[in-house]
Amino acid sequence: MTVDLIPSTTEEQTSIRDATVRLIESEFPLAAVRSFADGGPGPGAKYRSTAAELGWFGLLAAEAHGGGSASGNGLLDAAMLAAERGARLQPGPFTGHGIVVRTLSRAAETGRLPDTQAKTLAALIEGRSWATWLPPAVGTSAGVRAVAVASGPAPADEIVLAGDAGVVSDAGECGWFLVTAGHPDGLMQVLVPADAPGLTVRRRDGLDLTRRWYSVELDSVSVHPDAVVGPAGGQARRLLDEQLAVAAVLSAADATGAMDADFRLTVEHARSRIAFGRPVGSFQAVKHLLADTSLWLEMSKGIVSAAAEALGSGTPDGLALAHAAKSFTAERGTEVAQNCFQVLGGIGYTWEHDQHLYLRRLSAAATEFGPPEQHRQHLRDLAEAS
């Protein structure tokens, strides 16, 4: 069973989607996710390598750099896969990894990519390592409380990073971090290896048990100027706007997949659970609740696929649709999960049932890469600028 985020898929999209579902169900099915939530191992190198062979990690990169898409719109294809991952509660920094790949590929299109960055881009596309993005802290102006470029003592040919990047999902699995840092000229994007002296990744408890959460801190981390990705200042600000929009689309797609799977689970329960001699789904109150929930789910699919299509193809309304999709799914996702709780009744509140895993995933997704009000503010800013 697939999420069907895209109303009509090409033959190539169907092929990569179905192969993705087979990979997940053979390598890391829901039983493995439950073990992971209890402290067990996550997906290994084989999982990542096979995913790379399917093309997961090159969807947001240009063909000239080893990437390529199934449909000509890499973001739409990536959103389709993100939805299938969300439906099966897959761990791993898929969204952050895609942001890093996209940023490095775009930098290569506009100028020469330093050897270290070119090699890193190839490794990320080929699935030899995970990476993730450390955006500015939510609720702050450009990088003020994010990981920031410091002005302390350092050789002239080094850049020093210092600050707290906040809590990041699945950061412990990553070999590279793309840091969006404050800079006297505005913003700067810096590629930092996970083993850089002064960089500390600490495990944190989180509501969402299907992923692992870490705080990332940088204490006078020195990097070579070749680690800077693209220019600083205004162009970096525009890059950040694009990154936030792409992250919004992929995060919303993951949430929509989780909503779809949770709703299917609930409908099946409503059909099979008998009360007073009838399936509980035959009662009017339950039918109305499921109808409303189904409407929210289909609206989520519609706005996410429209946002991915528009942003991936570069249409003028792409940024606005991305923020609208994130805001809508963030709020409706938790409502869908709560409605499913109402239909499932007492069994849905047990640890053994999968329902709480979906609620946790959707609750965390609602604030990752910015809460709904932040994305509505982006919408207002875009409207005022137009």
Image (cartoon, rainbow, N blue to C red):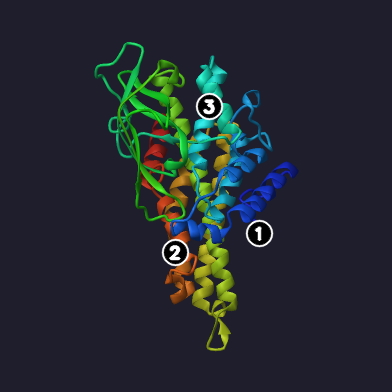
Tag on residue 211?
Answer: none
Q: Can residue 320 be seen here? A: no
Residue 184: name its quadrant.
top left
Q: Which residue position holds label 2?
A: 356
Q: Mark 2 falls on what kind of element? A: helix
Task: Tell me the kind of residue under disc 2.
Answer: His
Q: Are marks 2 and 3 in contact (CB under 8 Å)?
A: no
For mark 1, does the 10 Å Cα neighbourhood hold few (<14), some (14 to 19), or many (20 or more) residues?
few
Total label count? 3
Residue at x-position 68% and y-position 44%: 16
Taking depth in this image into account, of 216 and 358 the one nearest to the observer is 216
- Which quarter of the rendered picture does the N terminus lie within? bottom right
Placement of 153 over or under 300, stated as above or below:
above
Taking the view exactly as shown, the residue that stands out farthest to the left is: 152
Q: Position of residue 58 (x, y in %)?
A: 61, 33
Residue found 50% across the figure and 31% down from its top: 100
Which residue type carries mark 3? Thr
Relative vertical location of residue 159 with respect to residue 371 in this rendering, above or below:
above
Secondary structure of the residue carrying tag 3 is: helix
Q: Separation of disc 3 and disc 1 at Cα?
A: 35 Å
SS for tag 1?
loop
Q: Which of pointers 2 and 1 lies earlier in the amino acid sequence?
A: 1
Q: Which residue is mark 3?
A: 120
Label whose residue precedes the other's in the sequence (2 or 3): 3
Residue at point 46% right, 54% down?
210
Look at mark 1 in the image and give the residue it sits on: 1
Q: Nearer the viewer, residue 186 or 22?
A: 22
Residue 231 horizontal side relative to residue 307, left or right: left
